[in-house]
Amino acid sequence: MRIGGIASGLDTESIIKQLMQVERQPLDRMFQRKQTLEWQRDAYREVNTMLTNLERSAYSLRLTAAFNTRSVTNPSSGAFTATANSSVQNGNYEVEVQQVATKTRNISTENISADGKKISTTGTLASQTDAFKVDPSTYDGQSFTITTYNANGDAQSKSFNVDSSKSLDALFKEINGANLGVKAYYDSAYDKVVIERTETGKFTSSADPAAPQIEFGGDTGFLTDVLKLDQASEVGGQNAIVKFRNLSLDPTRSDAPIEKEQRSNTVTFGGITINAQQTTNNTFETFSVSSNTDQAFENIKSFVDKYNETITNLRGKLSEERYRNFPPLTDEQRREMSEREAELWDEKAKSGLLRRDSMVSSVIDKMRLELYTPVETSGQYNQLTEIGITTAKDYRMGGILEIDETKLRAALETDPDSVYQLFNNTADKTLTDIPKENRTLEQNQQISSQTGLVARIRTSLNDSMNNIVRRAGNEHRTNQQFTIGREMVSIDSRINNFQRRLTQIEDRYWSQFTRMEQAMNQANAQGAALMNQLGMGMM
């Protein structure tokens, strides 16, 4: 604790405080510069958040389903459901589901638990000798095999040992993990064991198609006696058989329908996918395909809206007023203001941090260029203007996009594939297979001209975001890994050095005032002694 001014009568502490306020001015400017950099860093990161959201919106247009303009009216019977992609022509179609694909399955012929009891699949077999109808420990050490067949009809077998010290679940886990394409489990409601194929369809032996599709071998006593699984009870899986007719091409039904047999219940005829659920009882059921541009239109509109929102926000940051007379507040200045006054001051201090920023303005310029450059496709559309998307006529709106709904819907209805190509066309593989470092300027230009708008925009956005990250970092980077961060680290170092210097200066001031006090004390003492001597002499 320092106390000054005893001899001089001066308010030493107040004087030194005022002197230090002058000395601290460079330090205050450093703190203000650091605060400005932090705000600028956050402003850049806010821009990157906008660009990320726009990139995600563009990515949603990469899916073919985003441009699917076909709607299907399915039959009321529920025997099947149909979906159609954008390449399918409007019209009526017929489907007959002759057979639905099923799984091969074998189920216990009777309950496996003893009367009045219920087995536990988690307890050991040895601990449940009286819970099963047949004591499972009797078969301890026996080995049985399960044989199945792959899609080519080749056999695949696996042996399993009966171990009464383990649970039924442990045995099922071993069977299910044996890559035999089967699954075994216990149904406690029916008190039966089920072993079935994991896939639908008919998987038989190429050598003997009449053989069981899930064949038991070896010592089968445990399977037949304990689990009540009878080989003869197997219900073999079957393939789906679906017939299809396009009534637009065969209105009189004079041609034989297209017939497909396969293991899955999902059967495709061109751009139409049939999901069979039950048979149609030897009759054809009709469904219709019609145009529905709503979803595709909304997907494109959503991207355009996000693009316009991003452009508007970026232009706002570029034109935001910069108030240079409102630097960041120091702690002392903030204490002297009300909360509302400090808030209003901060608003002006933060304003215009990215005004006329070249990095942000280049983002807008690049996106405009990518969107307005024609795309070389095999379709009829190669520019946005051809599908009804144009730049706003009012230049003050900053180049935002406007949609002619009638024109866009017409393009989606008449040739959705061409619209898809405009957004998602890919360059010729003979060009893209060339390593980047070996491509000529002309080849790069060809790749660019053949690339769809979405890929162009996403590439441009990612390049811009990477540039911003190099300057302003992100939540995964330390200050040493980006430009503004390194400047902040430098300022921190200068602040620390300057604070040490201020401490030395303050110590020097106190030392000087202390010596002054000491000198005044000494002078006062000498004066008092002289007065005493003069007083005694006069007596």
Image (spheres, rainbow, N blue to C red):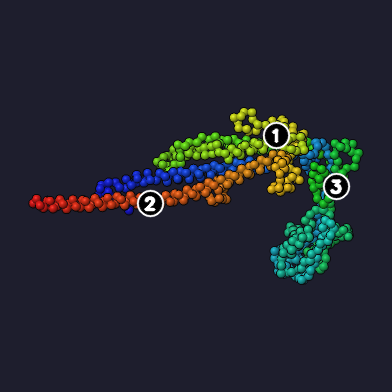
Q: Residue at x 62, y 35 (%)?
A: 308
Left or right: 365 as drawn, with respect to 231: left
Choose mark 1 or mark 2, whichever is in front: 2
**Along the viewing direction, whichever of 165 and 257 lies nearer the viewer:** 257
Say which label, 3 or 2, has the lower sequence index. 3
- Could you tell me how far apart the alpha carbons at marks 1 and 3 are, in whole angstroms? 41 Å
* Disc 3 secondary structure class: strand
Residue 272: x, y in percent?
A: 80, 42
Choose mark 1 or mark 3, whichever is in front: 1
Residue at mark 2: 503
Left or right: 44 as drawn, with respect to 251: left
Residue at mark 3: 260
Disc 3 marks which amino acid? Lys
Left or right: 116 as drawn, with respect to 233: left
Residue 534: x, y in percent?
A: 12, 51
Residue at mark 1: 384
Disc 1 marks which amino acid? Leu
**Along the viewing direction, whichever of 152 and 14 lies nearer the viewer:** 14
Left or right: 395 as drawn, with respect to 190: left
Disc 2 marks which amino acid? Thr
Q: Residue furthest top?
A: 394
* Disc 2 secondary structure class: helix
* Relative vertical location of residue 346 with respect to residue 147 in this rendering, above or below: above
**Along the viewing direction, whichever of 227 and 436 lies nearer the viewer:** 436
Q: Residue at x 54, y 39 (%)?
A: 354
- Could you tell me how far apart the alpha carbons at marks 3 and 2 are, in whole angstroms? 89 Å
Q: Residue at x 74, y 63 (%)?
A: 174
